[in-house]
Image (spheres, grey):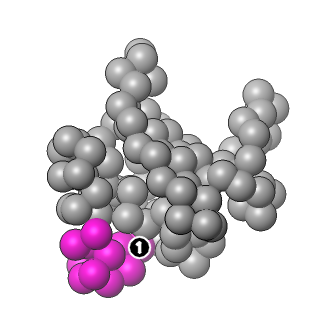
Amino acid sequence: MDAYIGSEATLDRQVEVCEKYGSACVFPDPAMKAGLALGTFHLMPITGVRITPENGVDGWYIFGGEFSEDENFYQPVGQSHIAELLPQVLPYLALAPGYKFMIDNEGYEDVWYEPHTLE
């Protein structure tokens, strides 16, 4: 098991989340990066969207609070660092491209599929 996954329990939780929301399990490639809005993780909710992987990015873009169109909003971060920076998102990272999630630190969870994110 790769370090970014965290633990066997995290892997089991990823499978549970995928099954719950009808997604194929597409585990992140530890050699790829994710786009993270690093300066926003103190804001709620935390939102993640997974698009089709390309150019060394596994498709995940994750931010806190409100989305910004600023071209510097996201920074490329290795998958292995997500467990350190945002452990609360680990259960969602096996969701297939086209899925989004929104969580907060009070237990809120929403997961949905938006096929237009794949265009």
At horizontal 43% and vertical 33% (from top left) the residue drawn is: 51
Using the image, determine if residue 90 lies above or below residue 28.
below
Using the image, determine if residue 115 lies above or below residue 61.
above
Give the percent coordinates (x, y) of residue 6: 38, 80
Residue placed under numbered mark 1 in the picture: 4
* Image side of residue 55 versus residue 12, left or right: right
Tell me where the magenta segment starts and ends, as one range. Answer: 1-13
Circle 1 sits in a helix, a strand or a loop, which is it? helix
Is 75 in front, or is 104?
104
Give the percent coordinates (x, y) of residue 68: 77, 34
* Image side of residue 25 versus residue 6, left or right: left
Please tell me whether residue 101 belongs to the stretch shown in magenta. Answer: no
Please tell me whether residue 7 belongs to the stretch shown in magenta. Answer: yes
Give the percent coordinates (x, y) of residue 115: 36, 21
At horizontal 32% and vertical 75% (from top left) the residue drawn is: 10
* Image side of residue 86 versus residue 90, left or right: right
Is 75 in front, or is 96?
96
At horizontal 71% and vertical 55% (from top left) the residue drawn is: 44
Kindly identify the amino acid type of the residue bearing the numbered disc 1. Answer: Tyr
* Image side of residue 6 versus residue 37, left or right: left
Toward which corner of the image does residue 32 lie, by quadrant? Answer: bottom left
Is 89 in front, or is 83?
89
Give the percent coordinates (x, y) of residue 100: 45, 39
Q: Answer whether residue 39 is visible to the viewer in this image.
A: yes
